[in-house]
Image: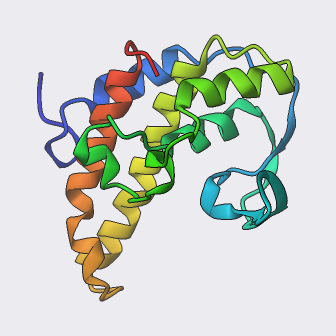
Amino acid sequence: MTEDVQGIAEVEPLTRWLSENVPESPAPTIVHNDYKLYNLILDPDNLTEVRAVLDWEMTTIGDPLVDLGASLSYWIEPDDPEDLKEVLPTVVGSKPGFLTRSEFVDLYAERSRRDVSNVRFYLAFGYFRLAAIVQQIYARWQKGQTKDERFASFEGRVCGLVKHAALTRSDSL
C-alpha cells in the first residue's frame, strides 16, 4: 500500500469504503451539521434539558443520521485512546453517569424511532469529516494565516482521526 494524504495510508481505502457503503438514508430532516455538546445550552437545573442549539450556519436538509455521527465523533469516553481524547479535549464524557456512545445511540434510536443499524458508517464518516476540518485549520496555521500555537499539533490529530475512522468500520462503539 502506498502512502496517501500526509502519509496516512488509511485515507484511500477509507474513502473508497465510505463511497461504497453509503447506507440508504432515512426520510430527510433538518440537519444541523455541527451538532455537538459545545453547541448546546443546557438547563442548569436539569442537564438533560436542552434550552437552545447554537451555530446553525451549516444547516441543510438531509440524512439526520449525519448529525448522530457528527455528535459521536466528538464524544469522548474515559477508556478512549489518548490521541482521540486530544482531538477536542473535554472532561464532560469522563464524568460519572455520563452516557457512553452506545447508550447515546440506544437513546437516540428509542426517541427518534430511526434505524441505527448503520451507525458505524455514520461515526466513521463523522471522524473523517472532523479530520478534514482539523486539516483545514492546520493548513491555515502552516501558511501563517493564523498564529494560534494550539494548531501546531493538529497534523497528528488528523492522522489519529483518519485511523479511528478506519477502525470504526469494524469496531464496536
- Residue situated in front as seen by the camera: 135 or 152: 152
- Residue 73 in the image, given as x and y percentages of width and height: 50, 41
- Residue 155 in the image, given as x and y percentages of width and height: 22, 58
- Residue 102 in the image, given as x and y percentages of width and height: 56, 23
In this orientation, does residue 13 appear?
yes
> Please, is residue 173 above or below residue 34 in the view?
above
- Residue situated in front as seen by the camera: 111 or 97: 97
- Residue situated in front as seen by the camera: 66 or 3: 66
Residue at image position (68%, 62%) is 39
- Residue 21 in the image, given as x and y percentages of width and height: 53, 14
Examine the image and state in which quarter residue 68 appears: top right
In this orientation, does residue 56 appear?
no
> Please, is residue 117 above or below residue 76 in the view?
above
Residue at image position (56%, 39%) is 97
**What colouring does the structure picture have?**
rainbow
Residue at image position (27%, 62%) is 154
